[in-house]
């Protein structure tokens, strides 16, 4: 199990790293599960997107996804400031193949196909992410694409895993099963993040 401390004193498990390059810049998306939060009865995923420029200057931003599967409530925050709260019942439930979230366009090769989870993220916090990116010394909209792809994929796969693991056991036991499900489907998360980031970048042209 790989440990990655985002904040001193907080133990997190690295779910996956997703990297790609564009115009000489290196982009990295990291999904980290907050182990300490699970021990306290919360399910929290930290999504960090970073860009390293040719001169090695690095800039990164993080969003925090908090899910309560008992109350069916979710929240997204940035540096402790809430951006959006939502009822999980109101979310467009993602389709899945073999337990991995699989937006319709990924299967058909149609970049214009509907992607309800990504579209929900765009509508709910897209403007916040735009403001975060615009506040950078040199705004990089591709970093915004990476951040949106990471948070939407973390949310979509978590919804699928929640359905898969069932409701038996304590809240903490259920959360650990969801965490294990996420790790078992890292390949699907990896592909989905890349596909969503690429789809977003096409829209920037």
Image (cartoon, helix red, strand yellow):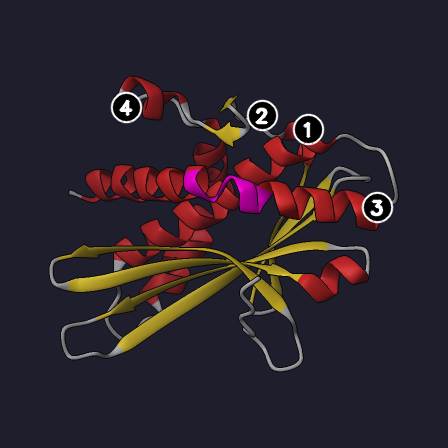
| Mark 1 or 4, closer to the camera | 1
Stretch in magenta: 182-187
Question: Farthest left residue?
Answer: 23
In the picture, the quarter occupied by the C terminus is: top left
Question: Farthest top residue?
Answer: 108
Neighbour class for label 2 at 10 Å: few (<14), some, many (≥20)?
Answer: some
Q: Residue at x 14, y 73 (%)?
A: 54
Most common secondary structure along the magenta stretch: helix
Which circle's residue, 3 or 2, is located before the other in the chain?
2
**Residue that numbered label 2 is attached to:** 93
Q: Looking at the image, do the residues carrying marks 1 and 3 touch, with CB atoms under 8 Å apart? A: no
| Mark 2 or 1, closer to the camera | 1
CA gap, disc 4 and disc 3: 38 Å
| Mark 3 or 2, closer to the camera | 3
In the image shown, does 12 or 199 lie closer to the viewer? 12
Q: Residue 126, image x and y in percent?
A: 43, 47
The verdict on residue 72 being magenta is no
Q: Residue at x 15, y 79 (%)?
A: 55
**Residue that numbered label 4 is attached to:** 112
CA gap, disc 1 and disc 3: 14 Å
CA gap, disc 2 and disc 4: 19 Å
Q: Residue at x 54, y 37 (%)?
A: 157
In the image shown, does 65 or 140 lie closer to the viewer? 65
Which circle's residue, 2 or 1, is located before the other in the chain?
2
Which circle's residue, 4 or 3, is located before the other in the chain?
4
**Residue that numbered label 3 is attached to:** 171
**Residue that numbered label 1 is attached to:** 163
């Amino acid at each position: 199990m790989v440990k990655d401390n985002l904040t001193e004193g907080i133990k997190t498990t690295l779910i996956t790293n997703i990297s790609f390059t564009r115009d000489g810049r290196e982009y990295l998306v990291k999904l980290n599960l907050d182990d300490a939060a699970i021990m306290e009865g919360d399910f929290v995923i930290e999504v960090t997107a970073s860009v390293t420029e040719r001169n090695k200057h690095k800039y990164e931003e993080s969003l925090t996804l908090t899910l309560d599967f008992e109350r069916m409530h979710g929240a997204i925050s940035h540096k402790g400031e809430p951006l959006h709260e939502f009822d999980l019942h109101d979310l467009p439930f993602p389709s899945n193949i073999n337990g991995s979230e699989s937006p319709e366009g990924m299967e058909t090769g149609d970049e214009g196909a509907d992607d309800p989870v990504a579209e929900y993220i765009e509508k709910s916090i897209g403007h916040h992410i735009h403001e975060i990116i615009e506040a950078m010394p040199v705004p990089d909209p591709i970093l915004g694409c990476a951040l949106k792809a990471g948070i939407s994929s973390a949310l979509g796969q978590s919804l699928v895993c929640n359905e898969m693991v069932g409701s038996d056991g304590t809240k903490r036991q259920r959360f650990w099963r969801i965490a294990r499900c996420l790790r078992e489907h890292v390949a699907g998360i990896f592909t989905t993040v890349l596909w969503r980031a690429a789809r977003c970048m096409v829209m920037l042209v």
